[in-house]
Amino acid sequence: MTLSQPSQSPQKKVSPEQCKHPRVQIVSRDEETEYVECQECGDVFESSELKDMAIEEKKEPDEE
């Protein structure tokens, strides 16, 4: 006799706060918005937020 275990979601490799979301997959789309899920941390957010994150990373702090 074999015991079957309920399927579990994959373990997250990093926390959403630390992840830079290098790999995302579209999970939902409506007329105005597209939602993506990070394959590394499991965070779900609007694809426009991913673009904003990339812009913020490219900005360099002002030197005084």
Image (spheres, helix red, strand yellow):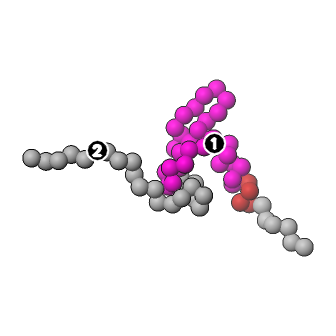
Percent coordinates x, y for residue 51 in the rendering:
68, 48
* Sequence-earlier tag: 1 or 2: 2
Q: Magenta stretch: residue 26 in it?
A: yes
Image quarter for residue 11? Answer: bottom left
Relative placement, left or right, of 56 versus 13 is right
Percent coordinates x, y for residue 33 in the rendering:
64, 33
Relative placement, left or right, of 3 versus 63 is left
Circle 1 sits on which residue? Answer: 47
Q: Marks 1 and 2, how far apart in space? A: 31 Å
User: What amino acid does circle 1 point to?
Assistant: Ser
Helix, strand or loop at mark 2: loop
Residue stretch rendered in magenta on the structure: 25-54
Identify the residue shown where x is 50% and y is 49%.
Answer: 42
Percent coordinates x, y for residue 28 in the rendering:
54, 34
Identify the residue shown where x is 71% and y is 60%.
Answer: 57
Helix, strand or loop at mark 1: helix
Image quarter for residue 17? Answer: bottom right
Circle 2 sits on which residue? Answer: 6
User: What amino acid does circle 2 point to?
Assistant: Pro
Percent coordinates x, y for residue 46 in the rendering:
63, 41
Identify the residue shown where x is 86% and y is 72%.
Answer: 63
Instruction: Between residue 8 and residue 23, name the one nearer to us.
Output: 8
Between circles 1 and 2, the one closer to the viewer is 2
